[in-house]
Amino acid sequence: MSNAVSILNGASSNGAVKITEAGLRGMITLRGDLSSTALKDAVKSVVGLTPPSERKVKSGKGGGVAWMSSDELLLLVDYDKADATVAKLSKALAGEHHMVVNVSDARAVFLIEGQGAREVLAKGAPVDLSPEAFGAGDLRRSRIGQLAAAFWMTEDESFELVCFRSVGAFMFDWLSNAAREGSLPEFL
Amino acid sequence: MSTRLASGGSVIDRETTVSFTFNGKQFMAHAGDTLASALLANGQTLVGRSFKYHRPRGIMASGAEEPNALVNMGQGDRFEPNQRTTTTEVFEGLTATSQNHWPSLEFDIGAINNKVPRLLPAGFYYKTFMKPQWAWKHLFEPIIRQSAGLGSAPKEADADRYEYFYAYVNVLIVGGGMAGLAAAREAGASGAKVLLMEQTANLGGRLSVDSASIDGKPSDDWIAETITELEAMENVTIRTRMMGSGVFDHGYAMGYERITDHAPDDIAPRHRLWRIRAKRIVTATGALERPLSFAGNDIPGVMLASAVRDYASLFGVSAGDRTVVVTNNDDAYRTAITMKNAGLEVPVILDARPEANRPLPTEARALGIRVETGKGIAKVKGYKSVTGVEICSQAGEGTPLETIPCDVVAMSGGWSPVVHLWSHCGGKLNWDEANAMFSPDPTRPPLGADGNGFVLTAGTASGDLATAPALQNAIAAGRQAAIEAGFTPTESAAALVESPPEEPMLPVWSMPQGAPYKLRSKSWLDFQNDVKVSDVRLAAQEGYESVEHTKRYTTIGMATDQGKLSNINGLAVLADSLNAPIPNVGTTTFRPPYTPISLGSIAGEARGPLFKPTRKSPIDTWQDANNAVWEPVADWRRPYTYRRDGETTAQAVTREINNTRTGASILDASTLGKILVKGPDAAKFLDLIYTNMMSSLKVGKCRYGLMCTENGFLFDDGVVARLSEDEFLCHTTSGGSDNVHGWMEEWLQTEWWDFKVYTTNVTEQFAQIAVVGPNARKVLEKLGGMDVSSEALPFMGFTDGILAGIQSRPFRISFSGELSYEIAVPAAQGQAFWDKILEAGEEFGIMPYGTEALHVMRAEKGFIMIGDETDGTVIPQDLKLGWAVSKKKEDFIGKRAQERNFLEREDRKQLVGLLTENPQDVLPDGAHAVEGGKNRYGQENMIGHVTSTYFSPTLNHSIAMALIKGGSKRMGEVLTFPVSDNKTIKATVVDPVFYDKEGARQNV
Amino acid sequence: MLMLKCPNCGVTAEETEFAPGGEAHLTRYSSGSEDQAFTDYLFARKNPRGVHFERWRHAFGCGKWFHAARCTATLEVFGTYTAQTSTPPDDIIAAIKAKRPEWEGFK
């Protein structure tokens, strides 16, 4: 897969907040009964983590797992491990009604880093991003301006954001514009 | 003449001088000045011309309510018309020009209108220009267009940038005067998250001008201490230069922050539109002073009494040397006292009330100011500036008793609470008889999601105009808002306010009371739209009883100031004319925004390249570098064709078609929708979604399928591939993937929730590249890695494997009628795969083709296109696709609808092919076929229309598809298409499959 | 602009995250049904002034459909609940009756 390229080849912009296209990430959509033991075990066997609770994300050495809806998880692994992970999950869940699909190529991922990351997102997402309402490990699916996106906060007040690949370049431009020097509202 | 005073001016910095220009003339101002105060400081009292009569106009107010002093601001790409001088802060290099005059502000041709006001009465739009008919187009309209509008429209794109910001708070407080500060302190002390916004640059509001003693301290100290306290609270944010622009459902409020208007060199966005959700909103929006209606009340120099003392006290500017005060209340005496104390002359206070004996009038008299009660102004003298007033008895008809020279008239008709934000979302008002004003009814607030009121009022905005009760109710509102937002206020002592008690005001709607027409026709109600007392009376005489109708007929309150000064006076005059009580006449609706906000702020960041997202395929960069002529396809952009040097677009399309039909070409089909459907009930589910039988599809095979709405009409189509017993991949149209995915989920979640089926939209996971043409197989063979022979991979089959070292899934499907492989590869490797195909295909003359070649080739084959042959009223049977509608299935979406007998009518519009008589004549898209005769409206009888039309290079003939009434039975008929006044195209009805009817070329 | 709570993911969000889906609790009539029943299913909507049950999809969020009980006149939201039911749940009915005693009930 040496010829696989992410949407912006890791481009970044440095405004008041740093925006980086995170490159290729392994992402797997897993749909099924989130309460079933088989599913929990299967998830643990591939990323070393049990599924998180509603609207949360967990990450560890073996990857991450995000709660996307009442019957959907997003598993985060290395890009080149995605197909093998899909195969492993499919095998583990063979007896269960489920769907597991590699969506790594369908996505663009961005890192929003630095003081003010909350405010960059709050320019486009109709979401309460104040520290009281949104903390590390919280995930939200919403919109950024006109684009659908999911984002979550990591330990260091930074965010990771996922959107569709076809609008990745637009998202980068949007985030970079929102993060321009001197434009943070300094409210959150 | 107006000028800068030697002392005073609490908000200006006399140490800092800035220069600006007005009509090209350079002036000096101090930091902290508004453009209005700076113009007055420089003696510039004439600042514009009025809308209709082009009368000279000056500065009337000191804040957002200003109706007259609007200017063009800035130049070039920063030009903006109709900016209020009273809310514009001066900065070094500001340029402003006056509006609505020609050739100059001082001498204006349009002022001729002023001499013939009887030509422009209320409703003149509807009366004056009716006859003769020719004159509208040739005389009236050009003149009106020439004179309409105030400022000029900007000619260049806006150089500034704008943005939104979403904020969530417990308590939002609008207004940073005494009430807002007090309410914020109470709410803040409870721990609630509080945002306080103030539209001006300074906190304190009227309390900064009309001082009182609060808790034994001068009010300036109280303001400073309260601000200090608020700034110390982590949970409280104060934003100045931010206006509460509107209140909407469920605690939604809009804040309009003007970040760099006063500092245009700042790198920050110019305006930020805050979209705020608050549990409770407190409107501490204060009150506005009302003008009085007397003849000549629009002449430059006639000002609101409060504005006259604002300029003196806040900016150290005198509006003039001799100020006559005319009032119906005690408050205006403060202006007389302020001016007198500043060493200026106040020749007389005219008080319409029979007597005035409370502390303020007493203080004025003690200063030696002459007070005349029961008196008013018959007429203001002057034209471009006030030169004097004629005094009369308020009770009489305006006989002048005395003429008093002066250069300023400070008028006060009482105060109205600013109820706009309270009312935006349904808060109701009561008529307060004593103060002759509408004030919020706290028992009928705007209701939130939980059914409870979510807006509270504080201070004078509640209708308590005196300082003491205003402060008390503001404290109560702040506490109540905190409680309702779920917080517990701390103990607080009631504030003790000392300010002079005032006499009730006397409603005065016309001055003098019996003013004859001559005076009424010079008494302005709406200064910006030039509506006079006589206009409203005329509307009433002509039968306009509703205030909403009168508003539109006279245009009162419809200017950019939305009647902040005129509405109450106007409806009082209407009520008086109708002999009805004011509350019965009612008030007009208050709508957001409170004052005009910039279009830029409404657009936010969505302009230029960020205007609208365009979806781009994984091959987009290559295409852009290879002369793609772009075409929007739903939210995507796709190459219409790839134009080579020296080619026209049409020539490029022809080249691409010929190459595909004779050699090999590639198409980027990545935009095609792809939805994965999996589960034990997947086959059963797809049998319901598609009109075809999908459960009988064999693993490894593809089938073309149709989807209908519950109304029976075709809305999407595509090829379904069965990946395994319980897993299908459904292709949709490029524009339809999100819709179809949503459609499937809707049925699964809301109707058949017992089905065990999961879906995922995998459209963007794959780049899909079609290799098409007689040499397509050779190209794939050269790529290597997989057996692509017709035995291993037959028509309508697919397989998984490796091609050119990349994980691939080729489908043997064809939208061109040629031998075709549509190959899905991971999107991240799409470009690499594309490059390898081009390399392998070089010896076969491979080239990319665009959507137009695709369209022509599918039309040559008679394949329909969703959106061309369908329009939401077409069933599959109309398109000769009845073969794809299962007769065996008990149910599918649309089946019941298709059982309706009218859908079986033989004269429905049906799909036909058309060959034009002249092979070179291409029918226009949408051309109508007529069959002779006229309908009852005198129009040609229409029998159908062209849905797709192209010149086919393959057939060297123009071809078209059309939906024609009873088309199936018209084979061979020649139809007539009138395409313009002098051209008719004739075309023969044929089968819509023009090329390779047997389908031999694709099945090899 | 409304605020609604999605019962599927627990988010209270503003209207721009949701897509409206018209009246809730329609009974589907399919092949072979009477003309009138089918017509009513397809076209006849209650459109009341007052208590209304409607469908929404958390389009920009978890993607799930849900139902909302709402007053069309005051925009008060009595409650939201998941879409996998053919009648409003008891607690929603009780919440409406508490606020609108005169309400004639779900029909």
Image: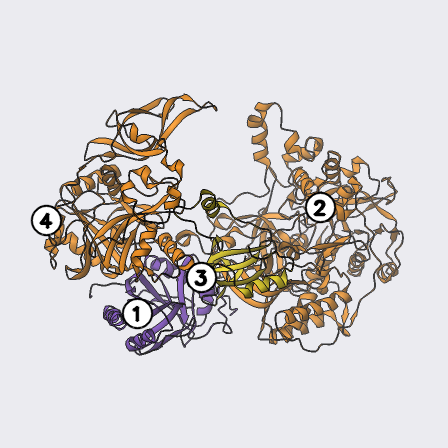
**Residue at x 71% of width, y 69% of height:** B476
Disc sitting over residue B843 in the figure = 4
Residue A58, quarter of picture: bottom left
Which chain is home to disc 3?
C
- Between B765 and B464, the residue placed more toward the observer is B765
The chain shown in orange is which?
A: B
Q: Amino acid at mark 3?
A: Gln
Give the foreground label among 4 and 3: 3
Residue to which mark 3 is pinned: C84
Residue A162 placement, left or right of B19: left
Residue to which mark 1 is pinned: A96
Residue B648 visible in the displayed image: no
Work out how far the residue at label 2 is from the one at label 3, CA to CA, in angstroms: 69 Å
Work out how far the residue at label 3 is from the one at label 1, CA to CA, in angstroms: 22 Å
Q: Colour of chain A?
A: purple
Q: Can you say which quadrant of the picture contains the N terminus of chain A?
A: bottom left
Q: Colour of chain C?
A: yellow
Work out how far the residue at label 1 is from the one at label 2, CA to CA, in angstroms: 83 Å
The answer to the question of whether label 2 and label 3 lie on touching residues, with beta carbons closer than 8 A, is: no
Q: Secondary structure at mark 2?
A: loop
Q: Secondary structure at mark 1?
A: loop
Q: Amino acid at mark 4?
A: Glu
Q: Are marks 1 and 2 on the same chain?
A: no
Q: Residue B623, how many percent across, how many down?
A: 25, 51
Give the foreground label among 1 and 2: 1
Q: Amino acid at mark 2?
A: Pro
Disc sitting over residue B300 in the figure = 2
- Between A110 and B741, the residue placed more toward the observer is B741
Disc sitting over residue B795 in the figure = none
The answer to the question of whether label 3 and label 1 lie on touching residues, with beta carbons closer than 8 A, is: no
Which chain is home to disc 4?
B
Q: Residue B906, how many percent across, how many down?
A: 35, 32
